[in-house]
Image: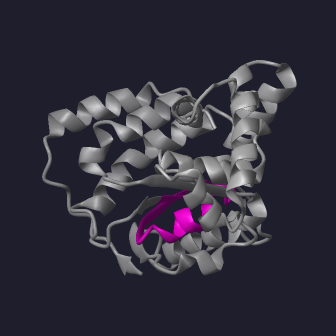
Amino acid sequence: MNNITAQQPDRDPAQFLEIAGQGAAVATHAELWRWLQGDVQQWLAHDALLIGWGDFHGGDLRHDLVSSLPGLRSHSFTAACISPLIGYFRDCWVAAQQAPCLVDITGCQQLLGHCSWASTQAIAGMRTALVHGTGDAHGGERIFAALSTHADPWPGGGATLRLLLPFIDTALRRMPPGPVRQASCERDGVHTSSVRLVALSEREREIMDWVALGKTNPEIGCILSISEFTVKNHMKSIFTKLDVTNRAQAVAKLSRKAAYA
């Protein structure tokens, strides 16, 4: 774990003001995802943003994930599964005297609880995390970890994350976390496609993660140690739940709805 200096990144200040203005208007999870995947990437290139908050001493934590990568979704990780990793990031931030810090997370899957195989592999693909946090007068803390598959630190990453954090934090406080959003959709009978997404079993989600990566049924069967026939049966179930007729449609629907999950 290394402290990141607060040196300002060599970027156009006018561009940052434009990005900041866009961030101030973010009100939904989809808008946050689009914002982070847009011009923000020029300032803070990352593959996923993990946010955790709650009782860090008692281990009762909540989380949110903003990412386009297969397997990295809020609903892919239970609180018990992801909390040890979030707690580790918080400890690194505290050890850095609450300054942005770069954390080497190769091998960090050992910190995960009973996560699905696909989710564990998705985290295992990450190499570094740029970590920073916020706190309030009541002792509440939020930890933000920008995860990346790259090993090299971002130029001016610490300063950039420090500047962007208030906009991300404010946007997230306007909306419920991922698991709550899903429960609300299912309870209220709205966003039918989101309900279908939640209805996928853990095995079906694993299979769709590999489908999105272009794997064939025999390859998926080999990876998951199940027969090709079983994979085909799962695919039929997935098509029915998502109301689609082929793999491309299934991937496209899951990709669109992942921004809300």
Instruction: Inspect the magenta stretch and tell me whether residue 131 lies in it.
Output: yes
What's the residue at 52%, 71% (across, down)? 124
Image: 246 above or below 98: above
At horizontal 75% and vertical 44% (from top left) the residue drawn is 233
Count numbered badges in the picture. Answer: 0
Q: Quadrant of residue 15?
A: top left
Is residue 234 left or right of 4 when viewed as pictured?
right
Establish if 131 lies above or below 189.
below
Q: Is residue 62 visible?
A: yes
Residue 154 lies, in percent from the top left, at 26, 63
Q: Nearer the viewer, residue 188 or 141?
A: 188
Q: Which residues are magenta?
A: 118-145
Q: Position of residue 156 (x, y in %)?
A: 23, 61
Which image quadrant for residue 1? bottom left
Outermost residue, right side? 187
| 124 is higher (above) or lower (below) than 43 | below
| Quarter of the figure that contains the C terminus | top right
Residue visible at 54% across and 55% down? 50
**Relative to residue 64, is residue 114 depicted above or below?**
below
Percent position of residue 68, x then y: 47, 45
Taking the view exactly as shown, the residue that stands out farthest to the front is 229
State the image coordinates of residue 207 (x, y, percent, origin top left). Answer: 64, 51
Residue shown at the point (40%, 70%) measured from the top left? 128
